[in-house]
Image (spheres, coloured by chain):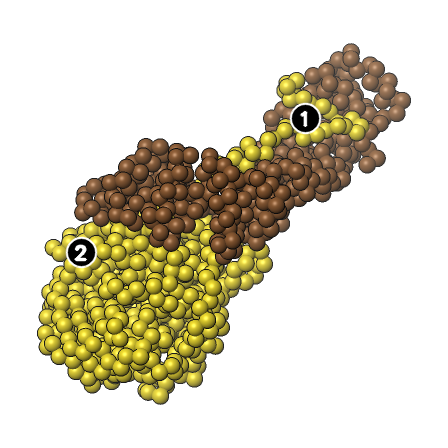
Amino acid sequence: MSARGGRCGAAGALLALLLPALPAQDVDALLADQGDPAALTDAGRELAGRGRAADAAKLWRKAAALAPDYFPALFNLGFMHYSAGRPKEAADWLAKAAEAGPRDFNAHYLLGSAHRQNGAREAALRAWRAALAIRPGHFKLMQVMAVEYGKGRYHKEAAELLRRALDLQPENENLYYLALSAYQQAGDYAGGLKLAARAAAKYPQSARANFEYAWHLQKDGRFDEGLPLLRKAMALDAGYEEPFFFYGDWLVKQARHEEALEFLEKAVAVRGDYIAARMSLARALMGLRRWERAVEVLNAAARIEPRHPQPRLLLSQVYFRLGERKKASAEKELSLRLRRRNPTFLEAAQTRPFPD
Amino acid sequence: MSISPATNFQAYAGPVNFQVKKSFPFVAFLAAAVFAAAASPANAQGVASSGSKPAPRVKASGLPWDAQFTDIAAEAGLDLRFTYGGETAKSYIIESNGSGAAFLDYDNDGRLDIFLVNGSTLEGFADGNAPTNRLYRNRGGSQFEDATQSAGLARSGWGSAVCAGDYDNDGALDLFVAYWGPDALYRNAGGGRFEEVAAATGVAGGGKQWSSGCTFVDYDRDGLLDLLVTQYQQFDPATAPPPGKASNCEWKGMPVYCGPRGLPFGNVTLYRNEGDGAFRDVSAAAGVRGVENYYAFTAAAADFDGDGWQDIYIACDSTPSIFFLNNGDGTFADFATETGLAFNEHGFEQGGMGIGVGDFDGDGLLDLIKTNFAGDYPNVYHHQEGGFFEDVVVRAGLAVNPQYVGWGVEYADLDNDGLQDVFQVNGHVYPELDRQTKVNETYKQSNLVYRNLGGGRFEDVTALSGPGLKIEKSSRGAAFGDFDDDGDVDVVAMNMADTASLLRNDLDNGNHWVRIELRGTQSNRAAIGAAVTIEAGGVRQTEAVLSQSSYVSHNDLRVHFGLGAAERVEGIAVRWPSGEVEEFPGAAGGRTLLLVEGSGEVAASP
């Protein structure tokens, strides 16, 4: 854009030479007499560089008043407010800057950052979308956006962005798993399956890659195809709990409780705080009528995560089946109280489309 | 103002080298995102939904499926077009839930008649123009005539639920209709006439109370039907927030009407039949009023735990469900959580709507099925011994269609092979879905049929079930019964802003059947709450006589069993609402059998 330099000609250069000694009253004079937005902007930059931000702002505001679409003044005001921790004011100026300089990456990026600090996630993402359109290969911006899409439950958009990020860094293994998680949250199992197959082919010795592919095959109704991959994942890394939990939980769902025990015990041994695995293990034990052991597992889970309602809920069911109705009711009441206090434990986030 | 050097302030002058300043390790970022999502408040949506995706389908059995449904509502004379709030947009939840339907023989002519509950609009209607409920009398030959006026049932307003029972034991079925506002109890006076006696008998309720479900139930075994009424919420449009204007007013990013979450809870009321024509509110004494913070819908009463006393299961929307176990002393206690009936298998609350009761695995224990909101599977609650239930929906094969909002549902042997299948009616609650393209959901949805394969497994045979299953409407209540008396189970369904569906089952596979009508003597005369077990062809089957099930609807009180190749029933056992179990001898099928309590004899129903 033509105004980027903020050049102000000979008068401006002379002015800059005088600036180190420029007293406050001369700033006032400059404000009164100078009619060149570029000269004012450059003067303001020099002042800002010397820590006189308030005076700089006065000059930039004057410049903006003289030329409402003069990008350098608008951007500098926005940047200054942003840097000073005033994102609301920053967003106002940066929005004007982004409009005056629609191809300026920094203006859009910084506008998005200001919006994010203001709690306006969707506006932030819109600004970042504009920034990314200017620099489509900006990997770090993709990271930032994927996180915000996720927080806003815009999982489909997050998945698409991570897929693009993967095109930029195809050797980044972790990126595959992040993208797979996003696909999963978006409910796009077909897209996830393709990516999981790619990851498994690229990283055949990775337990995670094999597990992800097996998981997606199961979701595609091809559990039998996934089972060798699950077994391979278990063999590759006995310290990776997910394949053990997944297979054990699947066996519980098929009422194959006895078979499930080995795998769920292993998942819990590997990761002691894995509440979902402990719940599945308890279900297997309940299915086998091994009440005492189920109570042990559930009590352990309740100790590990005392805020979680689910161990208490299952304890209420075990005690009911043991005919201990008072104990069952007490556990139920505790479970319900925990549910009200910690609703997110037992609520699923609902994915939604990004509002264009 | 001061600008800290740490902020790295760099004024714009010339082509700057401004970059994204921070470097964000990816894994840390994802962890942060996941944590943030988990810690955010409950999704800004008004209804519980797990966001579940369809589970993998098992390979189709390839077996022939003979139940074929055709919608004959128009030719049969069911001309009511339901009114239920705005048709293309809804401002308040009162407009969304729809109403129930009933198959009943109100005039004792042996033919199933149809009663349809209607709604209203927020704007109301000029005098004389308000839509009313409808009673359609079965004239035979699959023809119905409107008998609403002559029967005295022409009431307008926001009707929701219907349940039937013979509360005065005079041999004629009475009707209770639940409303937002005063409820209605129609005593069947005989001669095809009803008289409204809710206020006179003490069961009218009223105010801002939105009654949503009901069931007649003899909870104290005195032979008289008592009445349980569920209230969905205390609803007042003057205080309810408008669409999108509060939390709980969003569906997948789309502003929609608010609730049920965030709106005032309803409660449960139990009326005891005093035997003198009046009912007494015993909610507090019986322990049902102490159960709070629920949005309750359909209520189904039966002796679920087999102890001889009637229990009550209530589907609740976005709260745990309620399972009242009868203590046998005039009181109930809620054991839904303890028995596995409150939540799904992962402990999530669900948007529960309808309830089906049956015995899908032939073990003689009553199983349940509950329909839920979109993004959740139905709950297939398998009854294990000891009154404990396990949700086996994934294993059973019914976790394949979570895109539907399920309402009416029933276990019914649709092809008479001796195994109880599942019929589920569906319809979304947000008509606004039809004006957008981002969310892959529609207001009108097809219904679903699952064939029972035996061994506790089902398969989706919707596509094989005839033209009636290809129709998409936004359905709510559904009732089940053999209206054309041809030996198979038909369905009538309520549809939002549309006419009803009368789905005639044109089964022609040669399988045999039997229908059983019960008459109580010690128990209530209609034998509501009884459970019937038969053995035929080496297969045991159990059905319950229910005053309400499906979604706030009422099925034919005569229970229907498919017999497969067996031409006769080898034996029958009835667990009467009195708590007594009585055995009856075998009999030939292909007809309706009448079993009178205490007689020990099987007679052909007149």
**Residue in the image at 46% along x and 49% along y:** B45
Above or below, A223 against B487 in this view is: above
Q: Quadrant of the N terminus of chain B?
A: top right
Above or below, B534 against B291 in this view is: below
Q: Count numbered badges in the picture.
A: 2
Q: Chain of mark 1?
A: A
Q: Is residue A233 left or right of residue A139?
A: left
Q: Which mark is residue B326?
A: 2
Of the pair B40 and B96, the residue shown nearer to us: B40
**Residue in the image at 31% along x and 54% along y:** B390
Q: Colour of chain A?
A: brown
**Residue in the image at 15% along x and 77% along y:** B585
When asked about the image quadrant of residue A271, the answer is top left
The disc labelled 1 sits on which kind of residue? Met
Chain coloured yellow in the rendered structure: B
The disc labelled 2 sits on which kind of residue? Asn
